[in-house]
């Protein structure tokens, strides 16, 4: 079973990378990769859909929004190469989910243990805002990821990721009645026995203003550790 999951996980990631279903997003990714930011002018950008990253047997599935234009769209790995990723991977390292605190590129040696990362959207969108149609087009990648990974806890980074998970769980009959509201540290038990936990996104808008602190992230991951061990 484990080897079958490994093969299917790899195939899923290959299909995500090859996806061309949203012309606006593909064009934007390629344009950013062509023009590049001055700080990375000598680097070759990934410039396309970014695959899932992490442990395919994870008990924690982190759901983000979309690749950063000069982060994951440059490095080709979720949350890698920008300040959001710096915050996230430091927290994952402190919580024992990551092998190191630094994340620079796909070949930096970083590995995740018991944790996988996906996104609501796999391409970097203009102004970091995918359209509703683009999110709906990308949703089948999320559904396949959920089917493959034997996780026990969703961690939704930000309100869009939270809404994605809530809508998916409601469609699957895992949530009924009043829907849980997003908030930092919010949590909801699902009918499947899984849990949904929310966190403010580690964007510069949140971290620079102090809306999200490292101790706040640590508290969330501490709670997740409790939940996956129940």
Image (cartoon, rainbow, N blue to C red):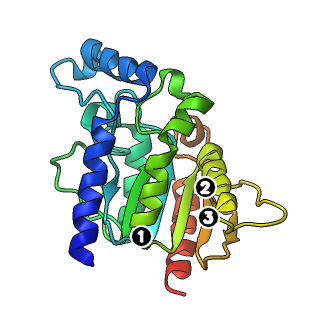
Q: Residues within 10 Å of mark 2 (few under 14, many from 20)?
A: many
Q: Do callouts 1 and 2 mark residues in contact (Cβ within 8 Å)?
A: no
- SS assignment at label 3: strand
Disc number lying in front (1 or 2): 2
The percent coordinates of residue 86 (x first, y second) are 38, 46
Check the picture and name the quadrant holding the C terminus.
Answer: bottom right
Residue drawn at (20%, 45%), measured in percent from left and top?
106
User: Closer to the camera, 79 or 23?
Assistant: 23
- Which residue in the rendered view is the most extreme toward the bottom? 230
Residue drawn at (67%, 56%), measured in percent from left and top?
166
Reply above or below: 15 against 224.
above
The percent coordinates of residue 142 (x first, y second) are 47, 51
- Separation of residues labelled 1 and 2 (CA atoms): 23 Å
Q: Is residue 138 visible?
A: yes
Q: Residues within 10 Å of mark 1 (few under 14, many from 20)?
A: some
Label 3 belongs to which residue? 197
- Separation of residues labelled 2 and 3 (CA atoms): 10 Å
Check the picture and name the quadrant holding the N terminus.
Answer: bottom left
Q: Quadrant of residue 124?
A: top left
Disc number lying in front (2 or 3): 2
Reply above or below: 21 against 220.
above
The percent coordinates of residue 44 (x first, y second) are 17, 25
Disc number lying in front (3 or 1): 3
Q: Quadrant of residue 187?
A: bottom right
Which sits earlier in the primary sequence, circle 2 or circle 3? 2
Residue 226 placement, left or right of 86: right
Q: Quadrant of residue 149?
A: bottom left
Residue drawn at (44%, 42%), measured in percent from left and top?
84
- SS assignment at label 2: helix
Label 1 belongs to which residue? 95
């Amino acid at each position: 079973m484990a080897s079958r999951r490994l093969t299917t996980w790899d195939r899923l990631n290959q299909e995500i990378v090859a996806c061309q279903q949203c012309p606006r997003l593909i064009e934007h990714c390629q344009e950013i990769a062509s023009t590049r930011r001055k700080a990375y002018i000598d680097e070759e950008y990934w410039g396309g859909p970014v695959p899932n990253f992490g442990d395919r047997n994870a008990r924690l599935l982190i759901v983000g929004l979309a690749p950063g234009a000069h982060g994951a769209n440059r490095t080709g790995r979720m949350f890698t190469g920008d300040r959001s990723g710096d915050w996230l991977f430091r927290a994952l390292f402190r919580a024992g989910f990551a092998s190191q605190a630094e994340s620079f590129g796909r070949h930096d040696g970083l590995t995740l243990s018991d944790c996988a990362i996906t996104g609501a959207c796999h391409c970097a969108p203009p102004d970091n805002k995918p359209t509703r149609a683009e999110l709906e087009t990308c949703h089948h990648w999320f559904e396949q990821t959920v089917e493959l990974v034997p996780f026990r806890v969703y961690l939704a980074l930000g309100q869009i990721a939270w809404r994605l998970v809530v809508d998916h769980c409601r469609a699957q009959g895992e949530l009924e009645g009043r829907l849980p509201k997003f908030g930092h540290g919010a949590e909801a038990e699902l009918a499947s026995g899984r849990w949904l936990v929310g966190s403010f996104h580690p964007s510069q808008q949140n971290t620079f203003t102090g809306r999200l602190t490292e101790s706040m992230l640590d508290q969330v991951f501490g709670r997740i550790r409790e939940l996956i061990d129940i």
